[in-house]
Amino acid sequence: MGLYDRDYTQPESRRRYHDLSQVQFNLPQVTPAVKWLLIINIVVFALSLVPSVGVFLASWLAIDTTTWAAVMQPWRLLTYQFLHKDAWHIFMNMIGLFLIAPPLERSWGGRRFVLFYLGCGAVGALTYITLAMVGWLGVGLMVGASGAVLGVVAACAVLFPHFSLIVFVFPVPIRIVAVGLMLVYLVNVLTAYGHGGAGGDAAHLGGMATGLVYVLLHPAWDRLTLKMRSGSWEKKMEESRRLQVEVDRILVKVHHSGLHSLTRREKAALKRATQEEVRRHQL
């Protein structure tokens, strides 16, 4: 068979091979809230590299458990999440946020996602602060978005179990990664009595536990809220029905005896019925 008789020299085949050469491995499409979190974290880190600015940011945004006055300033539970100690620290957190968080935001919406993200980070901080206050862990400076990002990992492990993460070049199911990390952090915290080496692990564990509890309990909370709203609606409809029956009775009384025969309570019932009717037409 000659060279020009082979499959890959034919026009259609050449087009097919050319198309294959154009295949690209696309990165995840970043969502709006994730994009802004990335931008804010990176900008704050860049500013912190300026010595005087870095000292200012740490003094006002970080959580320093060696100075308990700083712990009593609640905004730090949020602001500490946007500070990072070095390039590797912010790189690992931001790459995790970039790769894992967008599906969660698309599923929940930006507002709910941001509240969840910051909430996981805040509970992570409270976990470390509590253990430091009771003397289980040593005091120190706490910065970083790890608790928030790991809360996202835990949530995605429950909601998107088909996800895989690359660990040492090998794809590993996200559930296995999440369980493994939680066990490591738990062991580190339990064996860290009296020293501060596991302060970060305490925050990581708190963030992951928050993410896990939230996604597991939220469906039950939704059902309870729906039931409460349904009960409130039924109660409102029953009150409206009773008011209508009372109005019908009052109108019959007016027809037979005139307006002067109405009591103060009956006049109030007519006024309330009129207001509800006006409100209904406005809607």
Image (cartoon, helix red, strand yellow):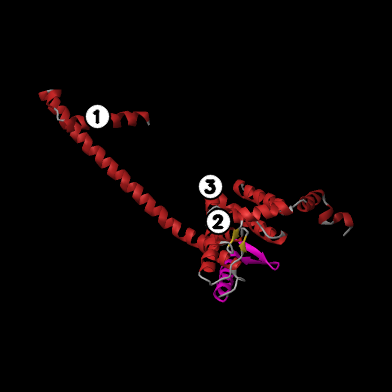
Please identify, in this view, whether the residue under mark 1 or under mark 2 is nearer the observer: 2
Identify the residue at horizontal 76%, vertical 53% (top origin).
20
Q: Secondary structure at mark 2?
A: helix
Which kind of residue does numbered mark 2 sit on? Leu
Residue with the mark numbered 3: 111
When asked about the image quadrant of residue 76, the answer is bottom right
Q: State the residue position of label 1.
A: 271
Q: What's the CA distance linking mark 1 and mark 2?
A: 51 Å
Q: Is residue 275 above or below residue 153?
A: above
Residue 108 lies, in percent from the top left, at 52, 50
Q: Which mark is residue 245?
A: none
Residue 60, how many percent across, how many down?
61, 53
The earlier-in-sequence mark between 1 and 3 is 3
Which amino acid lies under the numbered mark 3 shown in the image of this protein?
Arg
Distance CA(mark 2)–CA(mark 3): 18 Å
- The reply to whether the magenta stretch includes residue 255 is no
Question: Residue 165 in magenta?
Answer: yes
Q: Which residue is mark 2?
A: 77
